[in-house]
Amino acid sequence: MNAILDKTAQGKINWEATWIGRFNKARTSPINQRRWRNFRANSRGYWALWFFGVLFIVSLFAEFIANDKPLLVTFEGGIYMPVFVAYPETDFGGDFATEADYRDPFVQELIEDAGGTIIWPLIPYSYDTINLDLPVPAPAPPSAENWLGTDDQGRDVVARVIYGFRISVLFGLILTIFASIIGVAVGAVQGYFGGWVDLIGQRLIEIWSSVPSLYLIIIIAAVIEPTFWILLGILLLFQWVALVGVVRAEFLRGRNLEYVRAARALGLRNVAIIFKHVLPNAMVATLTFLPFILNSSITALTALDFLGFGLPPGSPSLGELLAQGKNNLQAPWLGFTGFIVIATMLSLLVFVGEAVRDAFDPRKTLQ
């Protein structure tokens, strides 16, 4: 038994050493160093990546920034964290066994009378919290309590922007990853084998691309309520086509190169040739398109939410914020906020895409 465990541990060590060695080799290779220098030379794209990354990381912790539940509550010597755990009102001396409403003055008075403290997030509103103490009818203009005002249902705009930014980026990333996997696989098969496989595949893609995806989504939304994953699946049915042409062209060019023909003559399997010899070259052109595909994925979700066929009602959505701006022209802060957030997000991704394009351009060199 000890010999088996030692052998397993040694195999794990060898596996880790192999991948660490590959990572260090890729990091220190001259071509990757040149790509990194070209990427950094595009200062607009380089800083756009940092800015977008900071915004996305901050949005991942939205519950700790904008929430109607306190981060920390001390009560009679105990420490409570409502942001993680739902505590009943009876734990604080209340009458109901349901979850405590910490915005209720009665609950706040119970905690303060017992000498406890309540530590709120920076923004004491979640994306679905309705401010019932507005001095004017909703939508309320920006104020010290609601920095960007409220929407027509009394919900804080800043909180909805933070949550909407996160769900938009996550939706775009997931859709881009799965669409890229399918598109690269289909393009690789068409380009590598060619002939009838390529001919039939191209005709099927042309037919599939002519299907009106918006009408299909409207029909599905009329039958069932679209959710995050249902929308993701529907858009994935059409989004994967974007990379097929690029990958197919790279494989058509690479399959007749000398080293590929030599590998085929030596008896190497087609799967090994595709993954080890042709695909790495095709990924160079593919990676330059990924930021733009992410951009289009986010735009597709925003457009569907704007038209009312996107996420379920009440979900934090940038497209829904734009729709409220259109329906409430007397509240210009809604339309301006949605436009600025979406324009900034898409512009940053475009700048990053331009920097990635420069990084993988073999003709671009630094003096």
Image (spheres, rainbow, N blue to C red):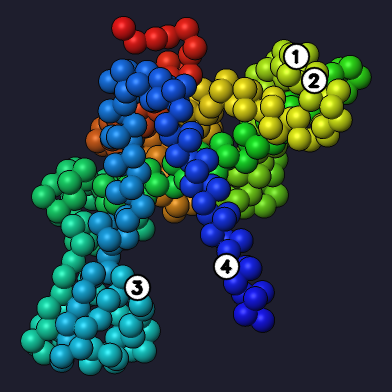
Q: Disc 2 designates what residue?
A: 262
Q: Which mark is residue 84?
A: 3
**Whole-number angstrom distance, CA of label 3 to CA of label 2:** 59 Å
Residue 120, x across and y down, in percent: 18, 66
- Which residue sits at x=33%, y=83%? 87
Which is more N-terminal, label 3 or label 1? 3
Q: Disc 4 designates what residue?
A: 9
Residue 5, x across and y down, in percent: 62, 74
Residue 285: image quadrant is: top right
Q: Quick one: SS at disc 4? A: helix
Could you tell me the amino acid type at mark 2?
Ala
Q: Nearer the viewer, residue 72 or 123?
A: 72
Which is more N-terminal, label 2 or label 4? 4
Could you tell me the amino acid type at mark 3?
Phe
Q: Disc 1 designates what residue?
A: 258
**Whole-number angstrom distance, CA of label 4 to CA of label 3:** 38 Å
